[in-house]
């Protein structure tokens, strides 16, 4: 498992944790154009969070080369970032993948060494050839040598897709009028044992959040002292799907630092006093 050197500024890291427009134009309500109503929310689209539950690792998918693979092949040693998309998606899936590329490109951790990424199509009609083409595009964006060995693009039959999406709580529907899927956007963090650790929603995933989640999901087997201190400063908010500042922990950390500084000061003063007492009087 890759580890990074411990910086000298680890202690510093903990311390750092410490109706008007219408009035102006004279426009009244009767002059306003009738605004289109927003589309009603799709009740069958979203994420049902299943934190702590396990996904079925015996499910079989096909990799980019068309070879059958079990999910268990990607687990056991490292945490896994799971991105449920479909490769012919005209908009949201591409934005989701672009956001993930930006986030992991800024990480010092390497896919295939410190963690794995699974981009799995939830459209059972898609093929390994589509997965291979998508991988070529994404690897060109990612631009690091570690990408191809640690970022996997999979397709599967309807039964495998249904079992995986149900286990993760990912809900989607086919929109016959638009001829595309209506689906949620986000990625799921899994432990090496296949348990659901975190959800990150939307199409942008802050590198700090992803880094802390990977460290926690790996049971702190990756990262360094600064990362461990940062975990004291932040806690994961499952409703927001992100890390937020843990004020209580900051207060506790500040109190501990104050106590340490006070004890150090008293110790130094006592040693000076004893040293002065031992000096012969002139």
Image (cartoon, rainbow, N blue to C red):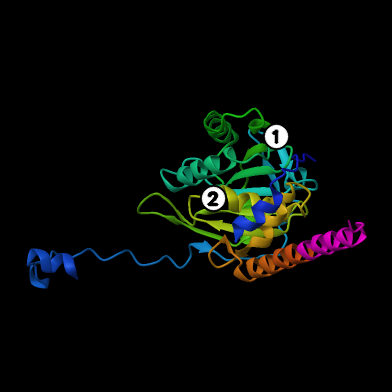
Residue 243, percent across and down?
58, 60
Which secondary structure type mostly characterizes the magenta part of the structure?
A: helix
274 or 250: nearer the viewer: 274
Judge left or right: residue 23 versus residue 76: left
Residue with the mark numbered 2: 206
Q: Residues within 10 Å of mark 2 (few under 14, many from 20)?
A: some
Residue 165 shows in the view: no
43 or 242: nearer the viewer: 242
Residue 270, percent across and down?
84, 64
Residue 74, percent across and down?
74, 44
Judge left or right: residue 160 versus residue 96: right
Quadrant where the image shows the N terminus? top right
Which of the 4 image quarters holds residue 104?
top right
The number of numbered badges drawn on the structure is 2
Q: Secondary structure at mark 2?
A: loop
Quadrant where the image shows the C terminus? bottom right
Residue with the mark numbered 1: 67
Of the residues under marks 2 and 1, which one precedes in the sequence? 1
Residue 110, percent across and down?
68, 37
Q: Residues within 10 Å of mark 1 (few under 14, many from 20)?
A: few
72 or 99: nearer the viewer: 99
Residue 139 shows in the view: yes
Residue 259 on the magenta span:
no
At x 58%, y 63%, the residue is: 245
Q: Which residues are magenta?
A: 264-282
- For marks 2 and 1, give the one nearer the viewer: 2
């Amino acid at each position: 498992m890759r580890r990074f050197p411990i910086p000298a500024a680890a202690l510093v890291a903990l311390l750092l944790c410490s109706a008007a427009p219408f009035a102006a134009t004279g426009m009244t309500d009767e002059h306003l154009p009738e605004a289109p109503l927003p589309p009603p929310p799709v009740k069958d689209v979203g994420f049902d969070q299943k934190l702590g539950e396990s996904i079925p690792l015996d499910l079989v998918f096909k990799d980019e080369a068309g070879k059958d693979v079990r999910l268990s092949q990607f687990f056991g040693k490292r945490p896994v970032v799971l991105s449920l998309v479909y490769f012919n998606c005209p908009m949201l899936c591409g934005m989701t993948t672009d956001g993930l590329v930006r986030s992991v490109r800024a990480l010092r951790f390497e896919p295939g060494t410190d963690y794995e990424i699974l981009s799995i199509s939830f459209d059972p009609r898609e093929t390994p050839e589509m997965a291979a083409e998508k991988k070529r595009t994404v690897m060109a964006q990612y631009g690091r040598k570690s990408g191809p060995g640690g970022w996997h693009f999979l397709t599967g039959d309807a039964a495998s897709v249904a079992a995986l999406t149900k286990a993760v709580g990912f809900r989607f529907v086919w929109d016959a009028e638009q001829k595309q899927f209506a689906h949620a956007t986000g990625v799921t963090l899994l432990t090496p044992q296949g348990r659901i650790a975190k959800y990150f929603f939307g199409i942008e995933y802050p590198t700090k959040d992803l880094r802390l989640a990977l460290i926690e999901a790996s049971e702190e087997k990756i990262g360094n002292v600064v990362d461990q201190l940062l975990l004291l400063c932040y806690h994961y908010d499952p409703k927001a799907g992100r890390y937020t500042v843990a004020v209580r922990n900051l207060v506790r950390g500040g109190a501990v630092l104050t106590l340490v500084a006070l004890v150090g000061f008293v110790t130094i003063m006592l040693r000076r006093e004893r040293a002065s007492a031992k000096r012969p009087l002139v």
